[in-house]
Amino acid sequence: MAHRGGATAPRFRFVTTLVIVLCLAALAGLVYVAARMITAPRPTIAFLSPFDKVGRTTPLAIDIADLSGLRTVSVTVEQEGARHEVLRRAYEQPPAKVEVRWAPNQEPKIPLQEGRGTVRVEARNASWGDWLQGRVVHAAQEFEARLKPPRLEVLTGQHYVNQGGCDVVVYKVTPPDVESGVAVGDRFFRGFPVPGSPDPAVRMALFAFPYNAKADTPVRIRARDDFGNEGLAGFTLKVFPKAFRTRELPVDGAFLGKVVPEIVSQTPSFTDQGDLLKNYLAINRDLRQANNKVLAELAQRSKPERLWSEPFRQLSGSSVEAQFADHRIYSYQGQEVDRQDHLGYDLATTANAAVTAANDGVVMQAEYFGIYGNAVVIDHGYGLLSLYGHLSRFGVKPGDAVKRGQTIGWSGATGLAGGDHLHFSMILQGEQVDAREWWDPHWLEDRWLSKLKEFGAKPASPAPSPAS
């Protein structure tokens, strides 16, 4: 009996030990799975662009990512209890990233309505392997939808514009608080309320037809709201093309030695290339573009009102030496080295002549200004500026209010100037335009002032005379 009992005990202990080991292994497995379930990463959901104000073309851009792969992804739009699917996918081979790109005017077509709604995103990853469901993340973005574009109505009739010149169109936009103006190709000229108009929806846009634009460049009134909806309206416009002069302009070592060191020393942003000709070409091309960019930025800060009343005035007693949009071919030692367009008028009188303001306005800039040397820039309102370049000295400072005919400086030869003269430019919302139009009182009356009188406030009737 003792012998049999002795044989059974080891087997019992073995079985017991095996069961314990298996239980511990199972428990360890459960602990491992639980640990993975607790520590497994969650998918990330990123809205890449604002989707709080939604118009017909507002893009929905969402990136969903997970290193372990994405098992399922869904994107839905909810409005007033209705639920519409933008995307629903289940992946047999889980990708690490899913990109969602959609807009209301694209497939799938969803019957959005004006008003509030919510975009909901759900993503489940494959972090627990094929035999478990993975971790789930939800994200939501509330939005307001506005799907109707602004309405436009043209109020003025026939319009005429010279290449390099300006005109004014008067229109009505609803709602009146949206951005609107005239698009000329890829250029945009902002509209403003017509002063004195009893209707806040009535706008005027003073626009330019660029000197280098093709005659068939599309010109349209454009209105765009905060939801990205855009309304367009054409209007009757006759464009008069103009052929601008081409002039050859030789430069020599003496000229380069005069202008280049001065401009380089006065322009901290300029990188000296150690060669007069190379520096000159960089000044004539790159610095010219940089200066014109600054003028466009200054125009954005222009006062939204007309600061002048009388026509603009050409510098008294001056003769025109170079015209607007002259195409210049520069040569050095008999070889062509550059081509640029001269966007202004060179006006000559006597050396160190008093330079006067072409019209009332506010001085925006009075400093050394690249190719223009000592230059004054005056704001006349509605994005219209005048520039006075190559001055020898200043008579005003930024912030000064000036009157038509007031001395603002004296002529000189600073900047890219071979001799004493005034460079005069007119700039409309960043586009340099032909100043001759603004010197012409008949043009001003026909193209702008008459329209303001027609669509602005009507003059008050005179009070009746007291009875005698």
Image (spheres, rainbow, N blue to C red):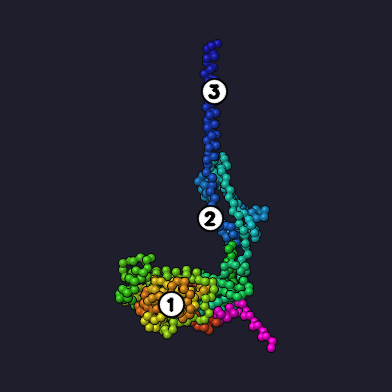
Question: Residue at image x 33%, y 66%?
Answer: 273
Left or right relative to 204: residue 374 = left
8, 206: nearer the viewer: 206
Q: Is mark 3 in CB contact (under 8 Å) with mark 1? A: no
Whether 467 is among the magenta residues is: yes
Mark 2 or mark 3, which is nearer the start of the sequence? 3
Query: For residue 258, which quarter of the picture?
Result: bottom left
Considering the numbered disc 1 on the image, is that residue within a helix, a strand or a loop?
A: strand
Name the residue at the right extreme.
Answer: 467
Question: Would residue 329 be seen by someone viewing this image from the given angle?
Answer: no
Query: For residue 322, which quarter of the picture?
Result: bottom left
326, 125: nearer the viewer: 326
Q: Is mark 3 in CB contact (under 8 Å) with mark 2? A: no
Q: How many discs appear?
A: 3
Q: Which amino acid type corresponds to the residue marked 2 in the rendered image?
A: Leu
Residue hosting label 2: 48
Residue 16 marker: 3
Residue hosting label 1: 408
Instruction: For marks 3 and 2, give the CA distance.
Output: 60 Å
Give the class, few, some or many, for how many residues have Cα within 10 Å of label 2's Cα (few <14, many ≥20).
Answer: few
Residue stretch rendered in magenta on the structure: 446-468
Question: Would residue 100 be seen by someone viewing this image from the given angle?
Answer: yes
Q: Which amino acid type corresponds to the residue marked 3 in the rendered image?
A: Thr
Q: Which amino acid type corresponds to the residue marked 1 in the rendered image?
A: Ile
Question: Residue at image x 62%, y 79%?
Answer: 458
Residue 127 marker: none
Mark 2 or mark 1, which is nearer the start of the sequence? 2
Locate residue 166, reporting x and y percent.
51, 77
